[in-house]
Structure formats: structure tokens, C-alpha cells
Image (tube, rainbow, N blue to C red):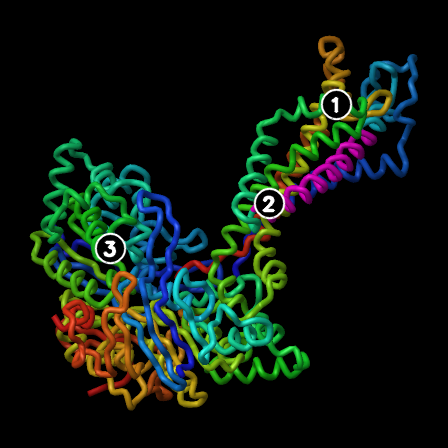
Amino acid sequence: MSLLEAVRVGRVFPIDGPQKRFEALKDVSIHLEAGESVGVLGESGSGKSTLAAIFGGLDRPTSGQVLYKGRDIATLKGGDWKCFRQSVQYIFQDPKAAMNPYFTLRQVLMEPLKVNRKELSKAQMVELVEDMTARVGLPTSILSRHPDEVSGGQAQRIITARVLLLEPEVIIADECVSALDLSIQAQIINLLRRIRSATGASFLFISHDADLVRYFCDRSYVMLHGRIVEELGQDLSASAKSEYTRMLLGGL
Amino acid sequence: MDSRILDIQGLCARDSVEELLVDVSLHVDAGGRTAIVGESGCGKTMTLRALLHTLPPDVEVSAGRIRFMGEDALALKGEALRKDLYMRIGHVGQNTSENLHPLLKVSRQLTDFSPLGRKEALEKATALLESLSIKDPGRVLSSYPGELSGGMRQRVNMAVALMKDAPLLIADEPTSALDAHVRRQVEELYQGLCEREGLSLLLISHDLSFVRRIADRVYVMYAGRVVEEGSLDEVFGEAAHPYTKALASLSGRRSLDRTRDLDEIGGSVPDKGRGDPSCAFSSRCPYAARDCHNALSYRHLGGSHYVRCCHELA
Amino acid sequence: MRRRGNPSLFIGLILTLLVASLGIIGVLHSPYDPEAMNLMQRFNGPSLEHPFGTDHFGRDMLSRVMMASGTALSSALVSVTLGALAGIALGTLAALAPRWLSTLVMRLVDALMAFPTILLALMAAAIFGRGLLPSVLAVCISMVPSFSRLTQAMVMEGRERLSIKAARAYGAPAWRIVIFHMFPPVLTRLVTQFTSAIGGAVLLESSLSFLGLGVQPPSASLGMMLSEARAYLLTYPWQVLPSGITLLVLVLGLNLLGDGLGSLLTRRSADGL
């Protein structure tokens, strides 16, 4: 039984226009085992982000199901749903947009604790937040700033800290470094690697950058027009069969 | 006639609180291909905005001059600004999807500002798109930007910039956040452009592998200053500044070793104290020593190679 | 954050407070009874006893302006508050309700928007009789559409924001998302809109009472004073000045205040560089 699994998932969006509907995902099946890092490669518009949203329960599929430890997440209720919600977390492409601009970074980090760890006292929460800030390599003095007063790399570290505070089993990273400079990309990827070895979390690593996927992931899926066209092992190019995949990997 | 199409000397810019650009001097030779490299926040785009008169409202140029095709670019105003600067510079912006109007067909965006008649302008646009290796220019011309792929939009953007027959083309981070194979297409496009006669290029990028394929002269900027300059071979072959070396080590991604951490430059670009005459990179520099806190000047390393660092790196 | 001066806020606040204090002083201690006539003292120019002069019944214009400003401001405040509350409720409903209900609500709002306020006031006057109440009601109803549209648009837009998705992802309950994540940006816009709407309401109430639909004599209102002064425009033209200038200062002040609040409350997003 996989930790998290999508079974023949489809997602159709109603749109204006002659077709009336847009199939963003067609019959997609992927699975993620405990402790595994799986890449999803594809061009922009191939349905990667829709898959990410459905895989983590932020969006509902129009067909098929998502199974968390063997149970359909659509049937989860109350405590079970809360448990799932807490154990699958996201790191998005644009870290600043993922924070409430009216919050200070301290409030940004406190909120998940207030929501999910009600048993903690305020002082314990503050302590956890400050520890985590240090763990992602930021000074605690930064916590009194607002999201628009920090750099993109610092913002992505804060988002990473927010995710880690909930001790998730699965982290879905949706193009989490593609908007950053190469130097900052390296910092964030190294941080994620340290987290992975420290916590054993599973990663769904969505990216258009084949080099990074090869570096970070154990195996990968290739997406095109809402379908999975190929599943690759760790050494991407060696196992690639289709021409599209080879083009994506830059082999041509 | 000047051999330099664009010549920036000692440019300083500041806002109400602090300095943003300090003593930036750089030039583009007529027919040359100059690149400015550095991380975000180093002042690359700010330099460009000073040239294009698009600085944020609280930022002003406090010293220095910019000569573009023999004219004082900072003094241009009104109609002269449009005619002598904007119509002579093709600018491909950072975010290609935001630079096109989403509700106008590509054909209109390519022809509207052209002094040619509509029919001739359309013919020219078609020819331009073909020269940018678009196979069916008719279809592209009659589409809206949203219907095109990222690579196509990038080409259309370049076509908009080239329609003016401007002698200088400025490209601001043309490869950031592009899919790998689209990036390669863009690289080829720019390589093709360089062959065009009489076109000079000013390229702004943090992607050194891209710069290496296109540019012939490179400026490395850090914290609002130029820290190293020289020809392509001088800067990449004999990199003299630790920052240049660090940037170069980031771009060789093809052969990543999974057992090791990625090379990174720890910390981030400082946003304060840029006017300080000592080295701004010393807080992130592996070679940092006490000398780094002294006032620095440029060292000449032969040819057109200059560096702003006190260390003699092999 | 770099801050620059905010002259609109400053000037708007001063102008509004000026008229508001006139109104408040008028309630606490009016120099004369604003309704006391003195036919021996008609059309007096400004003097130490009557700084704004006297009107065609010999009533003290300063006292009348004070009374009128108080009425104008308080009735505008009441009508806009009620209208805004109704508008916000409808707008939120329209943004979150199923499609058919939201279409129904918004079409109703559209119909309301197309309905002339004067006609509304006439109808209200026909039902409730002339006086302050029907004019307040009419102004209140006319405020509903702009607030409901603004709220609906902002809540709809807010739902798509990444920060909201992120909050859902870490399990924030719906009430938290609405109050802490959706409301603050809406609130700043609403405060701005509210302040400007009060300016509009003052103007609307004045035009209604100018037409004889609002406050009834012998009470004073700015519109009514203007309308009375109009009759003597050729013989005593300065009669329009006290009420006219007060109205001008008040509406200008409220609009500037709205603008100033808007730029104060909008957090500028980082400049990308």
C-alpha cells in the first residue's frame, strides 16, 4: 500500500468557448511511497500544478480517486481529514504570494500551530517557531518583518519552515525554486535535502528543470497534455524512451 | 562617430535612504554583445531602468552620465526621448507574458506603432517572424498572446523589439523560468540575432551558461557596483573575482553529484551600505581577509580586464 | 518601508473635522436658537453678533449652518453605515452562494443601481411622509449596489489567491480564512469606499432637501438653506455662501480623506527590485 496514490484521476474545467470544457488531467495514476522523492517533469501547461493540487487534497478530481494510506481522501471526515490535511504540505513557486501580506513573518509561522496544535501554550509555539526559523537558516530578528520586506530566497525559507512546523509525511514542492536565482536555488535545494535526511519526509517534486529532478529525485513521471507519458528511473536520460521525453531532457 | 553605441560612466543612483548604484561604468560597442551578470538585487535591472527613464518614483540618478548614440540619454525629454531613445532601443522584458497585451492580436501589437503603412508593416512582421524560425507566421499573427506557447511568446516579444529596426537590443533575463528545451530555442534565437548586421546587444542575465554562448564582453555586478569586467575569455577564462567564480560554479548543472550538496553562495545580496568603499561581497566570500575592509579600487589585469578585489587569485 | 507625506489625508481630515466640529458645537451650544425668527434683522451682513449674517426670516445663519452640518453628517453616517452593511452582506452572499443564487442577487443589485435615487426618495416620501426618515432610507438603499459589487469582486478575487490556498493547505478553518486572510484587503478598500460614500451621501441628502424631500422647515439643512437662498440670489447673493461653502468644504474634505486613507492603508508590495 502506497503512502499517497492517485488512481486514474481526471480533472475537467468548465471554460467559455466552443469546447465548453478543458481536460487538464486525463487518467493519471501516480504513487508515492514513504521516504521516497518522486519528480514530475513537464512543460508549463502540461497539468503538473493541477495534479499537485489534487494529489494534496486542495482540489477534487472529476473522476478517479486519491488514496491516502489506502483510503479515499474524499471519504475522510473530521479527525481523519485533519490528520491527512496536516501530513501533506505544499511549497509553492511564489513564496511571497503564499503568505498573507498583512501578517508579520512571525504570524505567518504561528498560524499553522494555532490551527493544528491547540494543546500548545503561546510560549511553546513561539519557541517552536524560533527554533524552526534558525533551522532553515534565518535570524529570528527577521520574524518581525512583513513578507514584502524580505527577499525571495528568505521568503521561500519561511514557507519551508511553515511546512516543517507541521511535521508532514509528504511535501509537495510545486516549482519551488524556479522563480529564484541559481545561487538561491542551490541554497533551497540543499535545505530540502537536509530536511529530507533529517525527517524522512516523502517529496513530490514538480519542476521543468530536468537537471534538478535528476539530482533530487529517486524516480520521475513525465507529463504531456494532462497525461503521464513515461515513468523514469533515477538516471532520467538513460531510461527515457519517448522522443518527447528526450527533448525535454535536452538530449536532442 | 563613436565606436561605442552606449556608454555609461560613473552612474550613481539613490533613493531617499541609501545608494542603489555606485559608480557603474559600462559600455556596448557598436555591433558588440555585452552582458551584465549577477544575482537579483545587484543593480542590473536598475541600471537599465536609469537608461530607459523608468526608475521607481523615489529613485534618482545622483551622478554620472549615459551617452547613447552620441546623445546625453539622461537629459532627453518628451518627443526627443521617444524618438532618440525609445525608437532606437528594442527592449525584450523579463516577463514575456506580461509584456504583451492579452486582448490584442499579435499582428496589431507588431504593427501598431510602426511608421510604415499597415500592409508593409504586416509584410515586415511576417518576414521577421519567419526569420525567427516560426513556420506559420500567418497563424501566429492572427492569435492572441494567450494562445501561444512560452517559446512562441518569447519570439513575438523579440519581433516587437526588432520591428523598430533599432540599433540596440536589450534583453532582460530572457531565459529565466523557461522550460529546458524552450531555453535552448531562445539561445539559438539570440545566437542568430548576433549575426544580424549592425545590431548591438545588451544582455542581462544571471545564467552564465547562456551568457557564455552569446556575449563577447561581460560585466559582473554585485550590490550596485561592477566588480569585474572584461572580454568573455578574460572574465570566464581567468575569473579574478571570487563572486564571478562562485557564479560560474552554479551554472554547471549537467553533471550534478547526488551524494554532495549543490554549490551555493551562502547568504544573500546586502541591500544596505552600498556606498561603503570596502568590498560588499566579503561577508559571503571564501577568501575574505582583513584587507577586504579597506577601501578598494579597480585593479588592471591586462587587456580590458579589471577587477574590484584585493586578492590575487590564481 | 519608505513613507512619503500624505497631504490628502491631512487636508481632508482638517476640512472634515472643521465642519464636524461646527456640527458638534451646534448641538452642545448654539449661539442662537436656529429656528428663532427676528423680522427686524432680515438679510443682515456678517457682524460680530451674527458672523455669517442672518437670513430672510432674520435667523442666525451660523446657528443654522451648525445645525444643518450636524444633521447632514449624522444622517449620512447612519444611511451609509446601514447601506454598507447590507451591501457587504449581499456581496459576500453573492460571492460564496451557488451560481443561481449569486446571479439572482447580483441582477437585483443591478436593477437597484439603475433605479434613480430621486424617484426612490419620492416613493419613500409617498409612503412615510416627508422628512428625514425617507431621505435617509433612499440614500441608504442607493449605497447598497456599490458596496455589494465591491465586496463580491474582492471576495471572488481573494478566493483564487495563493495565500488562501496555502492557508487551506495547512488546515485553517473557513472562519479563520475569511476573517484573517480575506477580510483585511477587503476592509481597507471598504474603509476608503465608506469615507467617499459619506461625501456622496451628504451631497445626495442635500439635493433631496434642496428639492424639498428631506428635512422639513423650520429645521435647517444645507440643501434647504441653499434652496431658500436661491430666491434672493439677485438681491442678496451672499445668502448662498454659508451653506454652499460648508457643503463644498465638507464634501471635498470627505473625498480627500477617502483618498488619503486609501493610500495609507494599501500596503505597497515590494518593487520587484
Q: Is residue C168 magenta?
A: no
For residue A196, side relative to residue C244 (left or right): left
Which dot, 3 or 1, sits closer to the camera? 3
Mark linked to residue B149: 3
Comparing B91 with A26, the one in front is A26
The quadrant of the picture occupied by the C terminus of chain C is bottom left
Cα gap from disc 1 to disc 2, whole angstroms: 30 Å
| Disc 3: host chain | B
Q: Earlier in the sequence, mark 1 or mark 2?
A: 2
Dot 2 falls on a residue whose secondary structure is helix
Q: Residue at horizontal 76%, vertical 28%?
A: C134
- How many neighbours does mark 2 have within 10 angstroms: few (below 14), some (14-19), or many (20 or more)? many
Whether residue A24 is visible:
yes
Cα gap from disc 3 to disc 2, whole angstroms: 37 Å
At label 2, the amino acid type is Gly
At label 3, the amino acid type is Ser
For residue B195, side relative to residue A231 (left or right): left
- How many neighbours does mark 1 have within 10 angstroms: few (below 14), some (14-19), or many (20 or more)? many
**Residue under circle 2?**
C91
At label 1, the amino acid type is Ser
Q: Is residue C89 magenta?
A: yes
Extent of the magenta region: C66-94
**Vertical relation: C267 (above or below) B143:** below
The verdict on a common chain for dots 3 and 2 is no
Tag 3–tag 2 contact (CB < 8 Å): no
Mark linked to residue C59: none
For residue C237, side relative to residue A102 (left or right): right
- How many neighbours does mark 3 have within 10 angstroms: few (below 14), some (14-19), or many (20 or more)? some
Q: x and y percent of residue C41 in the render?
A: 89, 15
**Residue under circle 1?**
C209
